Image: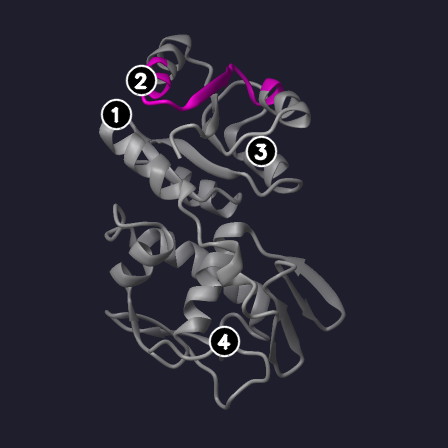
Amino acid sequence: MNSSRILLVDDEAQLRRAVRTTLSALGFVMTDADSGEAALELLRTERFDLVLLDINMPGISGVETCRAIRARSEVAILMLTVRGRAEDRIQALDAGADGYVTKPFDVNELVARIRATLRRAPKSALEQTQVLRLDDIEISFQDRCVRAGGKLTRLTPKELDLLHYLVSHANSVLAHNRILQAVWGPDYGDEVEYLRVFINQLRKKIEPDPSRPRYILTEPWLGYRFCLPQPQTGSPPAAP
């Protein structure tokens, strides 16, 4: 994992130097850019495993850059956001980021978040379930898409990971911290905000009426439950 290629995007030269030096010493292969425009150009020609992207930059903002990256790539994205700015964090997740780290950050926290983000669910596990049908909705885990009413909607990698975990534990109440640690990694657990944003995104994509969900149900004060009213052909087996 430490040989993973990371693109750091931030307009602060001092921060780029410090992060690049620290992560390079740990074995990560670092490239940096000082703007969203420069990052998008690099991503057209080079392959990266993760993008560290500052949310506040001149020119193309971090949020706009994140959306542009996510429109054509499934690369992992961690946003660098300002501490105390909840709207920034929500915007980052809405734009397709896998997570965020708030500035100023502790280096150990940053490294832990990077490693957790790079530990995605194995592809083979996701491919065990090809298609899940819910009434007139078809979810293809292999193709990372939802088909409903003739409309095709793509799932982001983290949306797919979350949905697969919920479906794999269908009809079971899953606590917030259990979902966070299973989908984002053991260093997560208190970031309920992550779940709220991603659950809302999933509901918009798979629920006939997101304001009155039928499948992804909220268990007040506890967590969430994926409701399968009856056995579904092609659905994953219940967890032991």
Q: Nearer the viewer, mark 1 or mark 3?
A: 1
Query: 238 and 8: which one is in front?
Result: 238
Q: Nearer the viewer, mark 4 or mark 3?
A: 4
Residue bounds of the magenta highlight: 21-38
Vertical side of 53 occupied by 201: above or below: below
Q: Quadrant of the C terminus?
A: bottom left
Q: Is residue 187 left or right of residue 235?
A: left
CA separation, marks 2 and 3? 27 Å
Disc 3 is placed on an element classified as: helix
Where is mark 1, residue-wise? 107
Disc 4 is placed on an element classified as: loop
Disc 1 is placed on an element classified as: helix
Where is mark 2, residue-wise? 22
Indicate the colouring scheme.
one colour
| Mark 1 / mark 3, whichever is N-terminal | 3
Q: Are marks 2 and 1 in contact (CB under 8 Å)?
A: yes
Q: Residue at x 64, y 75 (%)?
A: 137
Where is mark 3, residue-wise? 64
Residue 197 sits inside the magenta stretch: no
Q: Nearer the viewer, mark 2 or mark 3?
A: 2
CA separation, marks 1 and 3? 26 Å
